[in-house]
Image (cartoon, rainbow, N blue to C red):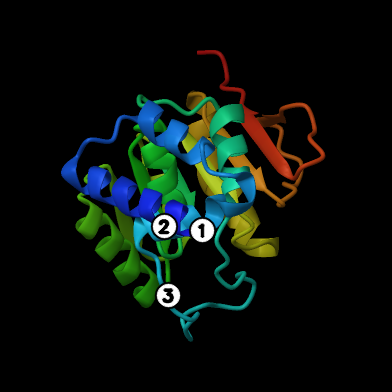
Amino acid sequence: MEEALWRSADGARERIARGARPPAWFRDALLAIPAADRDAWLDATLGLAEIPDDGPELPRGCVPYLPCPVADLLRVVERSSIGSADVVVDVGSGVGRAAAAIHLLTGAPVVGLELQTRMVDASRALAARLGLAGISFELGDAAALAGSVDAATVFFLYCPFGGERLATLLARLEPLGRVRPIRVACVDLPLPPCDWLEADEASPDGVQVHRSAPRPR
């Protein structure tokens, strides 16, 4: 990344830490960066120099932590129509990178769920150094915890797991989706058929949004 872009990231980080961070400003700042440099710019802006290695807490069936590309995060925000009135749950939130980006892009509160202690510690440190009171992180099994975030309207999944754990997650979300609209935004993660979820038109780029169909009262 060129020196000018590093300076841009430093300036953005300082502005975020001061609390002067309207979503429109952050989105414009991010989109002003050449597409090939946006991931590096976001990491520099958030101060993510190193990512902790996955630890022994990562159970079988879970995917090792990989950051979601900025291009996909932008698609998720747009196609899910995330706004400041939403509450987003990041399922398998890693070091908090996606949670911070979604919050800065939209103003929506984000709750990250992560079962690796070092990742949660890194996430909380990120939120603290940037003064991001709108994001929080819970330590525990996201498949079991996701349904307990009663105010959630959007669930974000960047292929955190599959198989039985994904089935468990969907079973925990079904009671919410049966009574009110929720959105499940997935990146590179096909969902099994669910009669309470309806997928938006298929997209070739791997980002798919599913919407619940609450039962009539």
How would you rate the neighbour count of disc 2 (Cα within 10 Å): few for under 14, some for 14-19, many for 20 or more?
some
Query: What residue is shown at x 60% (from left), y 70% (from top)?
Result: 62
* Residue pointed to by mark 3: 50
Q: Amino acid at mark 1?
A: Glu
How would you rate the neighbour count of disc 1 (Cα within 10 Å): few for under 14, some for 14-19, many for 20 or more?
few
Quarter of the image where one finds residue 105: top left
Query: What residue is shown at x 65% (from left), y 34% (from top)?
Result: 209
Q: Amino acid at mark 2?
A: Trp
* Residue pointed to by mark 1: 2
Quarter of the image where one finds residue 79: top right
Judging from the image, what secondary structure is the residue with disc 1 in?
loop
The image shows residue 207 at horizontal and vertical percentages of: 69, 41
**Sequence-first tag of 2 and 3:** 2
- Name the residue nearer the viewer: 215 or 62: 62
111 relative position to 196: left or right = left
Quarter of the image where one finds residue 26: top left
Q: Which mark is residue 6?
A: 2
Seen in the picture, residue 94 relative to 42 is either above or below; the reply is below
Gap in angstroms between the C-alphas marked 1 and 2: 7 Å
**Sequence-first tag of 1 and 3:** 1
Can see residue 86? no
- Name the residue nearer the viewer: 16 or 74: 16
Judging from the image, what secondary structure is the residue with disc 2 in?
helix
The image shows residue 22 at horizontal and vertical percentages of: 30, 30
Gap in angstroms between the C-alphas marked 1 and 3: 19 Å
Query: What residue is shown at x 42% (from left), y 75% (from top)?
Result: 50
Can see residue 5? yes
Asked whether disc 1 touches disc 2, contact meaning CB atoms under 8 Å apart, the reply is yes
